Image (cartoon, rainbow, N blue to C red):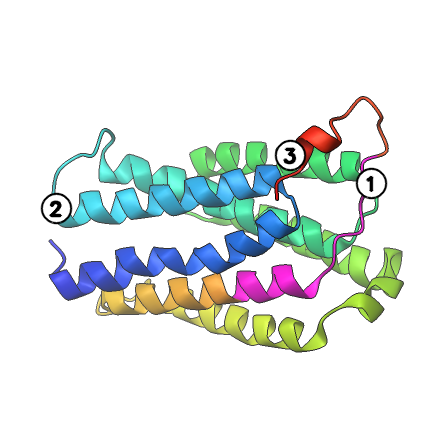
């Protein structure tokens, strides 16, 4: 069972995603906001259940599974945002594909592999690169470059800390630092890239869809 300090480092650091969710809300990305809020809740429930040693409606392993699916979906949604697509319908389709594939691929990989999950992220990374540098090169002129650089540094740090997690001698404090870096990277990436797509289907809600 984790110590109080280890629980604080791993569970409380899940709140590092909150600033990124604020940016998502400003962009009116309702599905992505739902995924992010759900993921943060699942992560907190997983860490709490694991720390106290009893189930909170679901087992800690089940909450861990849900958290992984939602975190993978949230990453893909961020990459979709970075593509700079002007078609809202295309973006909606890509988000649903990401969620569906994240769920199915996690079921396939389970806990002993990340082959399919890694392939999903790689696909959306390549799609984002294609969108940013080939399909919509003008988008770079609209970037917040400082936010993009900061997000890149934090994302690199998060990946390095994620790799360290597979060392059994690493403490949950490393996990907490990874959460903080990942949350910070997400915040700066959402802040760096503007929203370009607009709803063109008149059958879709307009005034009723305003978030804030």
Where disc 3 sits, the SS reads helix
Q: Is residue 190 above or below residue 69?
A: below
Identify the residue under disc 3: 97
What residue do we see at 45% from left, 55% from top?
A: 18
Above or below, 92 relative to 125: above
| Residue position for label 1 | 87
Q: Secondary structure at mark 2?
A: helix
Q: Are marks 3 and 2 in contact (CB under 8 Å)?
A: no
Q: Position of residue 33 (x, y in %)?
A: 54, 43
Residue at horizontal 56 percent and vertical 51 percent from the top? 75
**What residue is shown at x 36% (from left), y 56% (from top)?**
14
Q: Nearer the viewer, residue 136 or 15?
A: 15
Q: Position of residue 41 (x, y in %)?
A: 36, 43
Q: Give coordinates of residue 81: x percent, y percent.
A: 69, 51
Q: How many marks?
A: 3
Locate residue 146: give its quadrant: bottom right
Which callout, 1 or 3, points at the residue further toward the start of the chain?
A: 1
Looking at the image, is mark 2 or mark 1 earlier in the sequence? 2
- Write down the region rendered in magenta: 185-199
Mark 3 vs mark 2: which is more N-terminal?
2
Whether 194 is among the magenta residues is yes
Reading the image, the residue beneath label 2 is 52
């Amino acid at each position: 069972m984790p110590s109080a300090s280890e629980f604080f480092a791993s569970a409380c650091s899940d709140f590092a995603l909150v600033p990124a969710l604020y940016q998502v809300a400003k962009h009116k990305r309702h599905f992505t906001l739902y995924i992010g809020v759900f993921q943060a809740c699942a992560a907190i429930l997983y860490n709490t259940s694991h720390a106290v040693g009893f189930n909170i409606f679901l087992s800690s392993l089940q909450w861990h599974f849900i958290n992984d699916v939602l975190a993978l979906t949230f990453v893909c949604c961020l990459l979709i945002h970075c593509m700079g697509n002007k078609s809202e319908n295309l973006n909606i389709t890509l988000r649903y594909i990401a969620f569906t594939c994240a769920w199915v691929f996690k079921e396939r990989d389970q806990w002993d592999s990340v082959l399919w999950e890694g392939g999903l992220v790689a696909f959306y990374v390549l799609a984002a690169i294609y969108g940013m540098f080939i399909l919509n090169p003008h988008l770079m002129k609209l970037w917040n470059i400082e936010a993009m650089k900061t997000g890149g540094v934090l994302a690199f740090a998060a990946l390095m800390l994620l790799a360290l997690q597979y060392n059994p001698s690493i403490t949950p404090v490393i996990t907490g630092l990874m959460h903080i870096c990942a949350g910070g990277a997400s915040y700066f990436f959402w802040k760096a890239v503007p929203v370009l797509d607009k709803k063109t289907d008149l059958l879709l809600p307009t005034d009723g869809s305003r978030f804030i």
